[in-house]
Image (cartoon, rainbow, N blue to C red):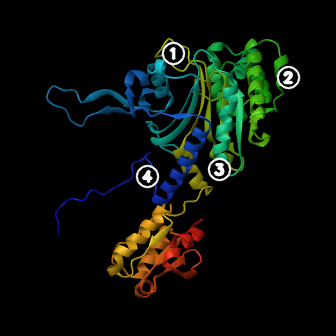
């Protein structure tokens, strides 16, 4: 017996590791997302997994959430630490990218980016330290039409309609509307962010606790805090909001929100998949206009499955160019974990192949390999079972991995220039002429 010490493998908290059948679901969703991003004219980019620390910390991000890079060891007199850290989102890398390549890009710049990001936060249900984000942004040079704000939800509608997760609604608001209402209700400007963060937590903690936070953190009088919450949670009347006195910011926000709503209707968005919701605040400081959150209608407890918004100046820390933009992000890893847990997405096969060519008699191995090659040339994903096992074991393998069809041939089949094709779902099988292989399998897998 070997004296080699065995290191017991253990999961790393916050770093998900999908099983094959789950990974195949993730890959299917990635294909849908990528296809729809490109259908709307978004161009892929990829930035390094690392950025310089000064880039990542320029917008005041909490440094304890950033993973810095260092070497495990260094030479004598060398410092193992580096000036690099893993990116925690894709917005900061986009800002740096646009500033760096400004003269080579065409504006409005429409990009999508699908990459992993890393955050040093406490792992919990639906929260990870490593996860995929799928982002789209439209960045303007000096100005950017509000019609772009209307197009972003259309992309999301196109994606989620194909994934098969049930009914969803994209909730839309404008930060200027909220800031104008805060102004009218007597909130000092230096308390706006505290008030917005309180409003952003409304669904999590309820109206009573939000009212208390508005009183304690935003300095609101109790009656005004409750009046504001009543206004926010009532079905919005944009005309009535526009007539309210006391805030030019409110009027501009209502105009922008109305323009986005008109754009959505012009773009053909169904009325039942979006709505204006004045409680949508988005806690991040850099949003300045339109904000979005997407929620499952029948499973609201899952929370927001996609969010984003408009920002006045993407890259002010890295360039003097004024670069307004609008974007949205799908946190794919978080979304998948919640959908798996809720049973809304069910993993299926453990293989992308639909056909298994079995090997009954290894004298005919070259023939089995030729059958698989013929199926692959016809565009049918196929695997050959290469191990010397009994046919029954091979069919058990096929069933466990989720193949749809098995091709079986032995002495009698090859003598008659025929094959047996087995439908693994129904158990039915048929003997076919060898030359009809592609046609017969195509009928079963389509």
- Measured from the top left, where is residue 409 in percent x and y? 44, 81
Q: Marks 1/4: CA distance?
A: 37 Å
Sequence order check: which comes first, mark 4 or mark 3? Answer: 4
The residue under label 2 is 239
Residue for point 34% across, 73% down: 366
Q: Nearer the viewer, residue 285 or 23?
A: 23
Real-space Cα distance between discs 2 and 1?
34 Å
* Residue 2 in the image, given as x and y percentages of width and height: 17, 66
The residue beneath circle 1 is 316
Quadrant in which residue 254 is drawn: top right
Mark pair 2, 4: CA separation: 50 Å
Which label sits on residue 17?
A: 4
Q: Earlier in the sequence, mark 2 or mark 4?
A: 4
Q: Between 149 and 437, which is closer to the camera in this rendering?
A: 437
- Residue 162 image label: 3
Q: Residue at x 71, y 50 (%)?
A: 298
Task: Write down the quadrant of residue 216 in the picture.
Answer: top right
Residues at circles 4 and 3 in contact by the CB criterion of under 8 Å: no
Q: Are marks 1 and 4 in contact (CB under 8 Å)?
A: no
Q: In this rendering, which labeled residue sits more in front, label 1 or label 4?
A: 1
Of helix, strand and loop, which one carries label 1? loop
Mark toward the start of the polypeptide (2 vs 1): 2
Helix or strand or loop: what does disc 3 sit on?
A: helix
Question: Split into 4 quadrants, where in the image is the N terminus?
Answer: bottom left
């Amino acid at each position: 017996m070997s004296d080699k010490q065995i290191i017991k493998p253990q999961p790393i908290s916050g770093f998900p590791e999908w099983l094959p059948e789950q990974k195949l679901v993730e890959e299917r969703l990635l294909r849908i997302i990528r296809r729809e991003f490109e259908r709307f004219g978004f161009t892929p980019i990829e930035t390094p997994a690392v950025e310089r620390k000064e880039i990542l910390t320029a917008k005041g991000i909490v440094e304890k959430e950033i993973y810095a890079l260092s070497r495990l060891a260094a030479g004598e007199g060398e410092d193992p630490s580096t000036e690099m850290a893993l990116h925690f989102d894709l917005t900061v890398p986009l800002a740096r990218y646009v500033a760096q390549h400004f003269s080579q890009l065409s504006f409005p710049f429409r990009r999508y980016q699908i990459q992993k990001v890393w955050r040093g936060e406490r792992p919990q249900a639906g929260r990870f330290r490593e996860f995929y984000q799928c982002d789209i942004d439209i960045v303007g040079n000096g100005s950017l039409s509000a019609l772009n704000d209307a197009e972003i939800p259309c992309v999301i509608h196109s994606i989620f309609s194909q994934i098969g997760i049930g009914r969803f609604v994209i909730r839309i608001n404008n930060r200027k509307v909220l800031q104008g209402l805060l102004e009218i209700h007597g909130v000092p400007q230096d308390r706006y962010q505290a008030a917005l963060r309180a409003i952003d937590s409304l669904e999590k903690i309820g109206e009573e606790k939000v009212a208390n936070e508005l009183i304690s953190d935003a300095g609101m009088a109790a009656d005004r805090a409750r009046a504001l919450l009543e206004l926010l949670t009532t079905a919005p009347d944009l005309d009535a909001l526009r007539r309210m006195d006391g805030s030019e910011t409110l009027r501009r926000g209502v105009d922008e929100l109305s323009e986005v709503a008109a754009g959505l209707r012009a773009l053909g968005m169904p009325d039942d998949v979006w709505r204006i919701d004045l409680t949508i605040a988005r806690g991040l400081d850099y949003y300045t206009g339109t904000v979005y959150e997407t929620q499952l209608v029948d499973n609201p407890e899952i929370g927001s499955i996609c969010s984003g918004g408009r920002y006045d100046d993407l890259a002010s820390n890295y360039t003097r160019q004024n670069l307004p933009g609008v974007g949205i992000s799908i946190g794919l890893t978080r979304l998948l974990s919640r959908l798996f847990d809720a049973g809304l997405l069910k993993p299926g096969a453990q293989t992308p192949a639909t056909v298994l060519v079995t090997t009954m008699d290894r004298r005919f191995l070259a023939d089995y390999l030729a059958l698989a090659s013929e199926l692959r040339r016809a565009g049918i994903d196929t695997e050959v079972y290469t191990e010397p096992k009994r046919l029954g074991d091979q069919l058990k393998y096929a069933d466990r991995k989720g193949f749809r069809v098995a091709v079986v041939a032995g002495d009698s089949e090859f003598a008659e220039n025929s094959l047996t094709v087995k439908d693994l779902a129904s158990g039915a099988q048929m003997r076919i002429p060898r030359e009809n292989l592609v046609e017969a399998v195509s009928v079963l897998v389509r």
